[in-house]
Image (cartoon, rainbow, N blue to C red):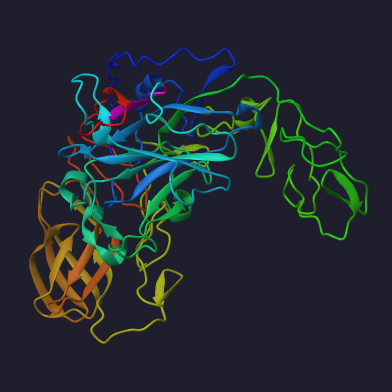
C-alpha cells in the first residue's frame, strides 16, 4: 500500500451521454460501504491525505466487488454508473489492467448462478479519444456511465432482492514483487500467492461485515483451476471496504407504504410487521395459528422468528436488515461515543486518522507490526498470518502439529536479526530443520548472498543493501526443491531521509507509508457495447 501525501486537483472530463432526464418519481441514490463522501471527487480528495491498505494479489479471472441491500421502498432501481478508486504499484509499472465489470442480481447474501450484465473494459468508450478501450488505471478515481438509451448498454432494473457489482481481472498475473515492494506478488503456490496485477484495490479504514466480495481460487494454497469462488473479504482476512460504488436512480424517497390488508401478523413489506401473535401462537400466511415452533430471536431486534412471526418491529423510518433495525433516525453522535475513527453507522465516519496511523476498533494506532517471532503459523496480529501448515497439519499455539511429514521437509523457525537498514548489508542467522548443502535463501524475490550451510538446522547469509523498505517472507530452497517458509520474517528499514512501501496479497491486508504521493486523476467512461463488423 502507499500513502497519499498531497491534494491533487480533480480533473473533470465532460462527455455528453445523451441520457434522458430522470422521471419525477426517481431520485439519485449512491450505494456504497466506504467511509468517504458519496461524491467521488470529494472522496478522492480525502483519500489523498491518509494512508490506506491495498490488495495487489489477483490472478486472471479473480475479482473483487460489493453486495448492496436496497430498502423495500427503493425498487425499482436503475444502475446508471459505477465509481471506484484503484491503486497502482508504488515502485513503477504499467499501472493498467483489463477487466470485466459484472452486475449480479440475487436474493441471498452472495451472488450465484451467472451475472445479469457484464461488459469488458475493452468495450468502454473513452470520451477523450472517442475510441473503444479503457483499462482500469491505477492511482485513479474512475467513473463508468451506462447508456440507458441503448437497451444493451445498461444492466437490468433491480426490482427485488440484492445486487452486486464485481470487477474481474482479465489480464494474466505476474511476479511484480519489485513493483509492489513485497514478496506477496511472487509465485508461491503453497501460500496462495500467485502473482499480482498492475493495479490493486484500494480499501478504507473500516470493514463492513459481509459487504465486500472476493472471487478467488479457493481454498487458498493453489494457483491453478478454472473454478473461482465468491468469499466475503472479511472471512479470508482482507480488511477495509473497497472504494466501489453504484450510482442509481431509485424510486421516490419517503416512507414505505405498509401493506397489511387481510393480515394480522407478519411482514408489512417495509421491514416492519402487521402485528404480533399472542403466546402459544405463531404467524403463518398473515394469520395467527397454534405455535409448535421454537422461535429464533436471540440477538435479533426484528425480522423473521423462524416460525412465521417477527422478532420485533423497527421504529418509523427504519428498516430491518439481518435482524437489526437500520436507517431512518440514525444517531451518528451516539454511535461515535468513545471512537476516534471508523464507521459512524450512518454512512459517514467518526474521524480520520492522520499520517500513517490506522483505525483499529475505533481508535487511531500506528502501523501494525506483525508478531511472528517463534511462530510458524496463526494470526500475525495485523490481519495476516505468520504461515500456513502443510497437508493435514494443524496450527496449535503458533506451531504446526500433525499431518503427514516427509523426511525431506524443510522448516524455517527464525531469522536473527529480524530487521536491517536498506542502506547496508545485514548478516543474518537462520534456524530451522531439514536444510541441505547448496540451499539458496530468498527474502521475497531477492536472493541473499554469502549463504553458508552450517548444519541441517543452521544457515548464515547476508541481506544485500538496496532492498525496498517493507516486511518480507523468508524462503529456504533446498537443491531437491524442498522449500521452507517463514512469513513476515524480516523488515527492511528505510533510511532516515527515505520512506517505505508495502502491499498485500489476496487474503491479507496491510498499510505502510510510501516515498511518493498517490497521483489521482478522474476518468469518466461511457459503458457501451462495441459494434463489431
Above or below, 428 relative to 177: below
Tell which of 408 and 25 is nearer to you.
25
Q: What percent of the width, then of the height, locates residue 420?
A: 19, 53
The number of numbered badges drawn on the structure is 0
Give x and y (percent) for residue 487. Answer: 30, 61
Please tell me whether residue 109 is drawn above or below residue 444 in the rendered image.
above
Q: Which residues are magenta?
A: 137-148
> With respect to residue 333, does 432 lie above or below?
below
Q: Quadrant of residue 475?
A: bottom left
The residue furthest bottom is 407
Question: Can you tell which quarter of the image residue 160 is in?
Answer: top right
Left or right relative to 296: residue 372: left
Camera-nearest residue between 454 and 522: 522
Q: Is residue 204 above or below residue 38?
A: below
> From the viewer's perspective, is 16 left or right of 236?
left
Q: Is residue 12 magenta?
A: no
Amino acid at each position: 500500500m502507499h500513502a497519499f501525501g498531497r491534494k491533487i486537483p480533480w480533473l473533470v472530463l465532460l462527455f455528453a451521454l445523451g441520457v434522458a432526464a430522470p422521471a419525477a418519481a426517481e431520485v439519485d441514490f449512491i450505494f456504497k460501504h466506504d467511509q468517504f463522501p458519496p461524491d467521488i471527487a470529494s472522496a478522492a480528495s480525502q483519500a489523498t491525505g491518509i494512508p490506506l491498505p491495498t490488495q495487489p494479489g489477483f490472478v486472471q479471472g479473480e475479482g473483487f466487488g460489493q453486495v448492496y441491500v436496497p430498502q423495500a421502498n427503493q425498487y425499482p432501481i436503475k444502475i446508471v454508473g459505477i465509481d471506484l478508486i484503484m491503486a497502482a504499484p508504488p515502485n513503477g509499472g504499467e499501472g493498467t489492467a483489463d477487466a470485466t465489470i459484472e452486475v449480479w442480481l440475487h436474493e441471498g447474501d452472495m451472488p450465484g448462478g451467472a451475472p445479469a450484465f457484464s461488459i469488458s473494459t475493452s468495450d468502454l468508450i473513452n470520451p477523450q479519444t472517442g475510441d473503444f478501450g479503457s483499462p482500469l488505471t491505477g492511482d485513479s478515481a474512475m467513473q463508468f456511465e451506462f447508456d440507458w438509451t441503448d437497451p444493451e448498454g445498461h444492466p437490468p432494473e433491480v426490482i427485488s432482492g440484492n445486487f452486486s457489482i464485481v470487477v474481474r481481472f482479465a489480464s494474466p498475473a505476474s511476479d511484480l514483487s519489485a513493483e509492489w515492494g513485497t514478496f506477496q506478488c511472487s509465485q508461491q503456490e503453497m501460500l496462495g500467492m500467485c502473482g499480482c496485477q498492475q493495479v490493486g484495490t484500494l480499501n478504507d479504514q473500516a470493514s463492513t461485515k459481509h459487504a465486500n466480495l472476493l472471487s478467488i481460487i479457493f481454498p487458498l494454497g493453489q494457483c491453478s483451476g478454472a473454478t473461482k469462488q465468491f468469499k466475503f473479504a472479511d472471512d479470508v482476512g482482507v480488511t477495509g471496504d473497497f472504494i466501489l460504488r453504484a450510482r442509481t436512480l431509485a424510486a421516490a424517497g419517503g416512507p414505505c407504504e405498509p401493506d397489511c390488508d387481510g393480515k394480522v401478523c407478519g411482514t408489512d413489506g417495509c421491514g416492519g410487521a402487521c402485528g404480533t401473535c399472542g403466546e402459544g401462537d405463531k404467524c403463518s400466511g398473515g394469520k395467527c395459528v397454534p405455535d409448535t415452533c421454537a422461535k429464533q430471536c436471540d440477538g435479533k431486534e426484528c425480522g423473521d422468528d423462524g416460525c412465521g412471526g417477527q422478532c420485533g418491529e423497527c421504529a418509523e423510518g427504519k428498516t430491518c436488515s439481518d435482524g437489526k433495525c437500520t436507517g431512518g433516525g440514525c444517531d451518528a453522535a451516539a454511535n461515535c461515543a468513545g471512537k476516534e475513527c471508523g464507521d459512524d453507522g450512518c454512512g459517514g465516519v467518526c474521524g480520520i486518522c492522520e499520517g500513517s496511523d490506522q483505525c483499529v476498533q475505533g481508535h487511531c494506532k500506528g502501523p501494525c507490526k506483525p508478531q511472528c517471532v517463534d511462530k510458524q503459523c496463526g494470526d500475525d496480529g495485523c490481519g495476516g498470518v505468520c504461515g500456513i501448515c502443510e497437508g493435514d497439519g494443524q496450527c496449535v499455539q503458533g506451531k504446526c502439529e500433525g499431518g503427514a511429514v516427509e523426511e525431506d521437509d524443510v522448516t524455517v523457525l527464525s531469522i536473527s536479526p529480524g530487521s536491517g537498514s536498506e542502506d547496508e548489508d545485514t548478516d543474518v542467522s537462520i534456524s530451522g530443520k531439514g536444510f541441505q548443502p547448496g540451499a539458496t535463501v530468498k527474502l521475497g524475490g531477492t536472493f541473499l548472498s554469502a549463504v553458508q550451510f552450517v548444519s541441517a538446522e543452521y544457515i548464515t547469509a547476508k541481506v544485500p543493501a538496496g532492498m525496498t523498505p517493507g516486511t518480507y517472507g523468508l524462503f529456504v530452497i533446498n537443491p531437491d526443491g524442498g522449500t521452507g517458509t517463514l512469513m513476515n520474517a524480516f523488515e527492511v528499514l528505510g533510511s532516515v531521509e527515505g520512506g517505505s512501501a508495502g502491499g498485500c496479497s489476496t487474503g491479507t491486508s496491510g498499510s505502510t507509508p510510501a516515498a511518493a504521493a498517490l497521483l489521482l486523476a478522474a476518468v469518466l467512461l461511457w459503458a457501451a457495447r462495441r459494434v463489431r463488423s
